[in-house]
Amino acid sequence: MQLSSTSFQPNGTIPLKHAEPGAGGQNVSPALSWSGAPQGAASFMVVCHDPDAPTGSGWWHWVMTDVPAAVSSLPEGGPLPEGARAWPTDYGYAGWGGMWPPPGPAHHYNFTVFALDVDRLDVPDDATSANVRLAASFHVLDQASVTGLFGQPV
């Protein structure tokens, strides 16, 4: 599989509009597009993780599942595809949670799309994103990632 974004270049700077308002942004989700899904893919999971966050386990900015197999892109700032579910981020709310790193070096934001062999994950609507990611891990057929950078001035 391949994953790309028209919102930023691979290993390039993610524009400020995608950051949280507290960081000066507008919390607009970036556009993502994928191709090369394997045969048998019934849905997709999309996540964004910052491994550089000073938490010991990074920071989850986006966890979305049950993206229908017919979908191969997400528009910038767009709504969830019909049938898709968004899960709470580490900010505590569901949906895209933009960048807001502490001042210092740029952080890496790893966007990953997973092709899953089920059309809907069997998890309750009040599941945590950690539970959702674990449940999805048993259904992964393939995955692709793209990384963007964002930092706050010191």
Image (tube, helix red, strand yellow):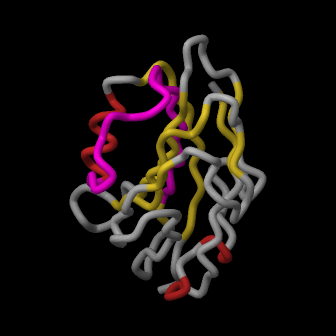
Q: Is residue 129 left or right of residue 1?
A: left
State whether residue 103 is above or below residue 51.
Answer: below
Q: In the displayed image of the protein, which residue is found farthest to the left?
A: 56
Q: Position of residue 101 (x, y in %)?
A: 43, 74
The answer to which of 129 and 102 lies nearer the viewer is: 129
Q: In the displayed image of the protein, which residue is found farthest to the top?
A: 39
The count of marks equals: 0
Q: Residue at x 67, y 47 (%)?
A: 10
Q: Quadrant of the N terminus?
A: top right
State whether residue 122 is above or below residue 83.
Answer: above
Q: Position of residue 24 (x, y in %)?
A: 59, 87
Q: Position of residue 97 (x, y in %)?
A: 49, 68
The answer to which of 93 and 30 lies nearer the viewer is: 93
Q: Position of residue 89 (x, y in %)?
A: 38, 63
Q: Quadrant of residue 17?
A: bottom right
Q: Residue at x 63, y 64 (%)?
A: 29
Q: Residue at x 28, y 68 (%)?
A: 54
Q: Residue at x 57, y 49 (%)?
A: 147
The answer to which of 135 and 29 lies nearer the viewer is: 135
Q: In the displayed image of the protein, which residue is found farthest to the right?
A: 6
* 50 magenta-colored: no
State whether residue 113 is above or below residue 15.
Answer: above
Region rendered in magenta: 108-128
